[in-house]
Image (tube, helix red, strand yellow):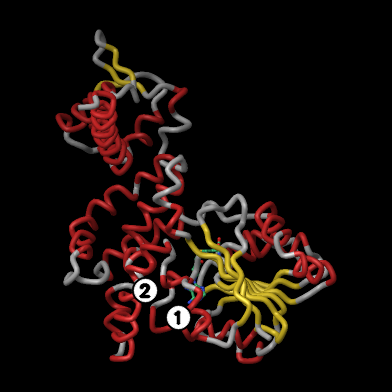
Amino acid sequence: MDPVFKASILTSTLEGFKMLTLTMAKRLRMFEILGKYVSPKTSKEIAESAGYRENYVTQLLDTMVTFKYINYDVQDKTYFLPIEHREVLNQESWPLKWLEIVPLFSAAQPELEKIFKVDGPTALPEAMNDAMQPWLNEHWGFDEPGEDYVKQLVDSMPELKNKLEAGIQVLDVGCGWGGLGGAFAKLYPKSTLYGIDLEGIDIAKKNNADIKNAIFSVADCTKLDPSWSDKFDYVYIRNVLHFVPPKSLDSSIQEIYRVLKPGGTFSLIQFNHKEIGPNKGDIFVCCGGAIGMYAYHGSEDACLGGTEETSKEGSKEEEYKMEDLSSDMPDMARSGKCPLVHEDRVLKAADFKNLQFIPIAFDQEHIHMTFSKL
Ligand SMILES: C[S@@+](CC[C@H](N)C(=O)[O-])C[C@H]1O[C@@H](n2cnc3c(N)ncnc32)[C@H](O)[C@@H]1O
């Protein structure tokens, strides 16, 4: 037995208990209560002000003392949240906000385990997926890329760079909060950036209020503006297709093809799952993989797309497609590419040509493919 390895697993177990303690304290708004006190209080005082049972509050406080989150005065039997801990231990701090996912994931775990089985369901129940969405919408978009990302991306495509500098029409499909779109518009003021998304457009507009050449609007990528045929010189879509139900994947790709000008370029940037395993050093890639397993298992990871509900909506044709995708899985495991983003998927759906893989140097999490409309 390797004692160091055993110790590391024991540490993980202990960290798990710490996580549960923090999660419970946060959900019970204990940090808000403790953060208001300027002097130490007894557990009775704390419990009364919270409207909680004292014996339970004492136990939670004692656990937090043991984990050294809060201080305890043995003589006065009082508890105090140290001033220097308050910046981190408050209801709004991001490390704690991340912990909100723990109870959601815990509730989803038995259902997720069923999905592993070959004859099990293909996705989480709709209600469970819905329960996660607000958290994902709020927190999983926190790393929207900006100008550095766009520079790297465009530097790797010199022809496109020249066009962007001269002034072209660009479409960001599923632009989110406009981080990437705003950066494109700012870096290439002679070009016009259109950003579309099902939601979050108000935030995208607000975030880019001072940028005149960026136009954000609500739209569904499965049905783009009919007047946009052959309008755009460059269309990109990043981290969106795993949200699109399988039956609409082909129409999304066909819509992108339609709105692209002949001679235009389409960039598809999507999670590159092969990096999750081999990229052992990157904790964020691992977190992405873990969250993906719970939250997007019904789409990207299970390669089926959508929730149980959207899967059910599928017609006979849809069922066939899903089987078709499943049969890609061994190949996916070998290549490390998800069939959802597999080049064949795009090439089959529309008349795209000239597939190229262009890595984005500092974004090993994603795979970047470009296609041309001739
Ligand atoms: C993970 S975010 C990616 C945002 C941005 N592209 C990025 O890379 O930072 C996924 C976005 O896809 C959007 N989305 C999902 N389905 C869509 C659809 N059918 N049409 C347009 N946008 C969609 C979501 O609303 C969300 O803003």
Badge 1: few (under 14), some or many (20 or more) residues near its Cα, within 10 Å?
many
Instruction: Give whichever of 294, 86 is nearer the camera.
Output: 294
Q: In the image, residue 186 lies at what x, y percent?
A: 76, 60
Residue 106 lies, in percent from the top left, at: 24, 51
Please state which of residues 338 and 83 is positioned toward the viewer in this rendering: 338
Answer yes or no: do the residues labelled 2 and 1 have beta carbons within 8 Å? yes
Element marked by disc 1: helix
Q: Amino acid at mark 2?
A: Gly
Image quadrant of residue 80?
top left
Rendering coords of residue 318 (x, y %): 33, 86
Q: Earlier in the sequence, mark 2 or mark 1?
A: 1
Check the picture and name the quadrant holding the N terminus.
top left
Residue 249: numbered disc:
1
Q: Given the current orientation, which residue lies at the most extreme left position?
A: 55
Measure how far apart labels 2 and 1 are at the Cα level.
Answer: 9 Å
Labelled disc at residue 305 = 2
Look at 65% across and 55% down and name the residue there: 149
Direction from residue 256 to residue 349 in the image, left or right:
left
Q: Quadrant of the C terminus?
A: bottom right
Up-down relation of residue 92 to residue 189 (above or below): above
In depth, the one of 167 and 93 nearer the eye is 167
At x 20%, y 59%, the residue is: 113
The residue at 52%/52% (across/down) is 142
Q: Give the mark count.
A: 2
